[in-house]
Image (cartoon, rainbow, N blue to C red):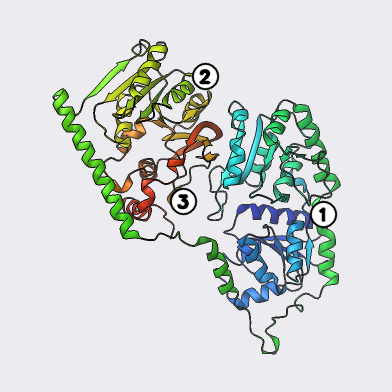
Amino acid sequence: MRPLNVFVAPRGNAFMTDIAGWLVEAGELLGRTATLRADGTLPDDPAALNLVVAPHEFYLLGDYTDAAIHRAAQISAPVCTEQPGTPWFDIGTIPARVAPLVLDINTHGVAALTERGLPARHLRLGGVPSMNATGGGVGAAREIDLVYLAGATDRRGAHLATLAPLLWDRHAELRLFTFSRPVDGDVPGLVFGRDKYELLARSRILLNIHRSDGAGYFEWARFLEAMANGCCIVTEPVDGYAPFVAGEHFVVADDLPATVARLLADPGECARVGAAAQRAALDEFPLTASLGPILDELEHGLDIGRRAPHSTAGGRRVPKYGRHLRVAQRLPLLPPFQPNGDLRLRAYQAMVAETALQRRIDRARCLVRHGRDDVVQRTETPAYAGAAPAVSVIVTLFDYGHLVTETLDSLVRSEGIDYEIVVVDDHSRDDGRAVVQAFMDAHPDVPLLLLGSEINRGLPAARNLGFSAARAANVMVMDADNMVYPSCLRKLADTLAAHPDAAFAYATLECFGERPGVASAKAWYVPWLCEANYIDAQAMLRKSAWERAGGYRTDDALVFGWEDWELWLRLAVAGEHGVHVPQMLGRYRTQAESMITTTNLVADHMIAHLRELHPTLPWPP
């Protein structure tokens, strides 16, 4: 038997290293000498059977010459893992043009490769013994009700948001990541190999939501890992899953909330599907059953190295792999179109100047009426003075009188924790302050302090005022149009207690209103934070961390609206960090008027300013 070498990019997604490891394990079970090659070297032994997992990463991330890629591609079979129609799939097909055989883990990919005239086979993934972390059985100790492991897209976020009412009081693990760069074991919140298998072995349900409409894509790698650990898969309708059987080895749902609710109420059904899936993955349809015939075909049925139509023999030139790969990589990464830059900057500067003028007028009026140019009126409920809160909740209010009662109602439904509420009315132009006063009159038993500012100081300064008045060591930041679920304060406080070195804790937010979805859905990771602010201000900070950082940045026009992002960046520079709770514990209201914000006018200038403020952070090139 020829030896088997399985190549994978050393700097690629760790998901691909997992798949490569399965192939090596299956090769060894088939009696071959099998080696995992993750050292950056190219296939160079035509006498071996060479598989290249995820060619879109392997060739793109390595510093190889065109001639070297050409030679390697001629003596290896690429294992394609990406969905047709994506740039990653297209990149993978470039070196595949000269391969003796092209493998794909999904039948959709096989069909697309065949249409391009490539000799493609379906490498059906199956279980290998190392996947199983249940100790041989499905197991009864599954403390996680639902787990979700996938890249973040708008469609997935919108579907996840519909599950928030079901999951806020459950143990859910919603672990999302971004596609902007390869992810590995250094990215918080993501798990690979044995850690992932143990997570799945502790979970009752694995949820699958397609990346885009009409995808119907059977996620072979993710599903096999769950099946091998007896985890019940709930998925949108899929195809191309044979030999597995829908309804027996996984659950197909046209209505995700209803199906998840039914299964959460029926642990026995979850266990039955999970047990059948585990038997199928590990015993009935293991990876060896599909890999063996393919390796035999490569060994005996193909003349490796002689198929390539672009061989350098006879004076034919080597294709320009590097150029094609770089072009394909750049296509989805074009910068945003931002016309009329000077006009947008002038409009923004005029708006900032108008706001500053209005605030000076406020101060003049305050001086005339009260004898001072900054007056804050304090109003307390009867319960406030004697309270000993574990958490202070700051609610900043400006012209949200019609919504603030919903926010306060959600806070008073909090369970299992002593809290106080500090409302900072930033000189609202509506009846917001009166609405809060009416709420205080109706809830005398709620520890609530109303700080009524007679001037408008702006959101970051209003938050700083709330922090100064907060009596608890942990401070929850809220806007007056957002809400929390009853378990939010307790779970975030518990997270800070479990991570004494963390500056703050935050949970995934269910976005509702104009644009359903999720926010604050990824773990703290500074490279991601330098690309965009994905952590909303709705978070629980240690008051000591706020004090060390010097509070929210005020009076900086080029941070307007991004003060929370700038605070997270400042904490990162100081070596501090936040901890993500991967559950939907808060609610973020999206409104039509928030779709186009003032900051969009000069976003490029503002990002440049943030980079100047914090030059030591790992900003993207």
Dot 3: element: helix
Residue drawn at (40%, 18%) of the image: 389
Q: Separation of disc 2 and disc 1 at Cα? A: 51 Å
Residue drawn at (46%, 61%) of the image: 335
**Are the residues at dot 2 and dot 1 in contact (C-beta closer than 8 Å)?**
no
Q: Position of residue 491 (x, y in %)?
A: 52, 27
Query: In the picture provided, is 394 more to the left or to the right than 176?
Result: left
Dot 2: element: loop
Mark in front: 2 vs 1? 2
Q: Position of residue 57 (x, y in %)?
A: 61, 62
Tag on residue 527? 3
Q: Quadrant of residue 565?
A: top left
Residue drawn at (31%, 49%) of the image: 558
Mark 1 highlights which residue?
Answer: 288
Q: Separation of disc 1 and disc 3 at Cα? A: 39 Å
Q: Is residue 51 above or below residue 496?
A: below
Q: Earlier in the sequence, mark 2 or mark 1?
A: 1
- Which of the pair 52/407 is nearer the observer? 407
